Image: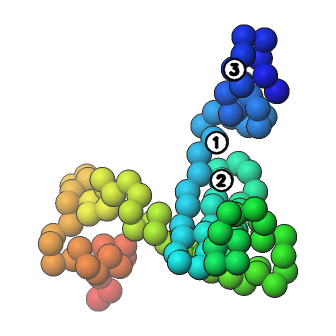
Amino acid sequence: MKESWGYSPPPDKELGIDFEACSFNVIRDEQYKYIHFADLPPLFFDLKNDPDELHNLVGDQAYMELILKYAQKMLSWRMVNDERTLVHMMVGPEGVTERPISQKNDSHLFLFPKQA
């Protein structure tokens, strides 16, 4: 739909979603490409058999397990690479403090008090 002044409306208006939801993430390799939108259905393409990305395979039951695998890969990547500001912090009687270096790789150590 074109506005009267010649430009398309912004994506949030065109798609009927909030502007904050107009984002997506992509994970791909040589064979497949998975695109996850914040507020729209995902897309999944077999790049070897469909290099122009014309056939979305999300509705194809034969690809469901593979689509789930790529969605999980994306979620894991996001969890590792997303906002990391407070990763090495802990809350205790002294307030918010940085965990000692020796515990940074043992994230479970700061969750529970030591057992007697």
Locate residue 11, reporting x and y percent.
68, 33
Q: Which amino acid does label 1 sit on?
A: Ala
User: Is residue 20 found left or right of 111 in the rendered image?
Assistant: right
Secondary structure type for disc 3 = loop
Q: What residue type is labelled 3?
A: Tyr
Quadrant of res 8 = top right
Residues at circles 1 and 2 in contact by the CB criterion of under 8 Å: yes
- Residue pictured at 29% horizontal, 88% vertical: 116
Secondary structure type for disc 2 = strand
Q: Nearer the viewer, residue 114 or 70?
A: 70
Badge 1, how many Cα within 10 Å: few under 14, some, many 20+? few
Locate residue 67, reporting x and y percent.
69, 76
Q: Which mark is residue 7?
A: 3
- Residue pictured at 23% horizontal, 74% vertical: 104
Pointer 1 residue: 21
User: Is residue 49 found left or right of 94 in the rendered image?
Assistant: right
Q: Can residue 113 be seen in this view?
A: no
